[in-house]
Image: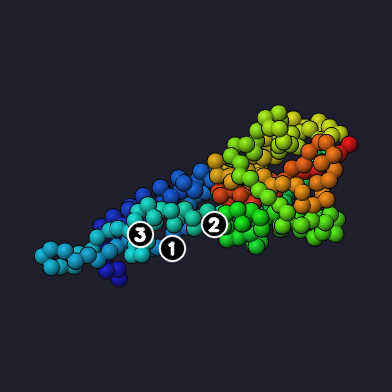
Amino acid sequence: MSEYSEQELKHAAEFRNDIHKAALEKVRAIFPDAGSVVDQYSVEDYFQKVWDYPGKWYTVVGTPSGAGSRNNLIDTIVRNTLEYYRNKGKESDNNSFYNLIAEYPDIVCDYCIVTKEEEAFPYCGVDSHRLALSCAASKIFDGGREWSYDLSHARSKKLKSKALFAPTGADEWLNYRKAFLCPPDGNTYTDADFERVNNVLFPGGTDELEVYRWTTDWSEYFDDGHEWWGSLCLTVYDKSLDRFVVIMASATN
């Protein structure tokens, strides 16, 4: 039999539900179809014993012991829930992107999605970007059997996240949109195609993206682009999905 009255349990459940609603609102900014949150605490955990005047123990409703403040608890629930949905949809999401990009055989961009199973994690800033680039290079370059590479020569520059989707003529260097839409031999793709691909690749938009542009002097993969058209190497960390996307391009006519 519960040590708490029906009224006390109702009060605790209402308090817990308010926490869950606040957390779910944040989760739905990333996963709009999320229907619930992951909370390790039961309703009973939301009771606390406090010693108060006149020297007596009282039972009050509040955040569980060790959970911290209300905001800290909400953040914990959001992190745990996002992790659940990421793991649930990760393989499906990645396959969906690779299946989609196969519909665009005339683009010259190469993509590699780097997830938490790989050595770029746990995330630790630009060092993780370099590790993600190393992982992608090994896959795209077939471990060095197709193109040789030496990442010790690679240098990076952080870009504003919105620069990732800049117009084709916005930069002196070969940017991502131009690499997608304007290869040396041309293609029939439009800005709508570019948006379609990137809505799947980066479903949360640019706000949660961290973008680094890398030099392209570290692999013969980029030699063709160095002739005149240009070469591109980007690592993009998506905080909302906790994964990296590596984008490379190099071509000549």
Q: Residue at x 56, y 49 (%)?
A: 239
Which residue position is annotated with label 1? 40
Q: In the rendered structure, which disc, 2 or 1, sits on the residue that comes first in sequence?
A: 1
Which residue position is annotated with label 2? 83
Q: Nearer the viewer, mark 2 or mark 1?
A: 2
Q: Quadrant of residue 137?
A: bottom right
**Which of 221/198 is in front?**
221
Q: Residue furthest right?
A: 253
Q: Residue at x 40, y 47 (%)?
A: 22
- Give the residue type that dot 2 points to: Glu
Q: Residue furthest left?
A: 54
Is any atom of residue 136 visible in this view? no
Q: Which mark is residue 68?
A: 3
Q: Nearer the viewer, mark 3 or mark 1?
A: 3
Evaluate if marks 2 and 3 touch, with contact meaning CB atoms under 8 Å apart.
no
Q: In the rendered structure, which disc, 2 or 3, sits on the residue that comes first in sequence?
A: 3
Residue 51 percent location from the top left of the image? 19, 66
- Give the residue type that dot 3 points to: Gly
Q: Quadrant of residue 153?
A: bottom right
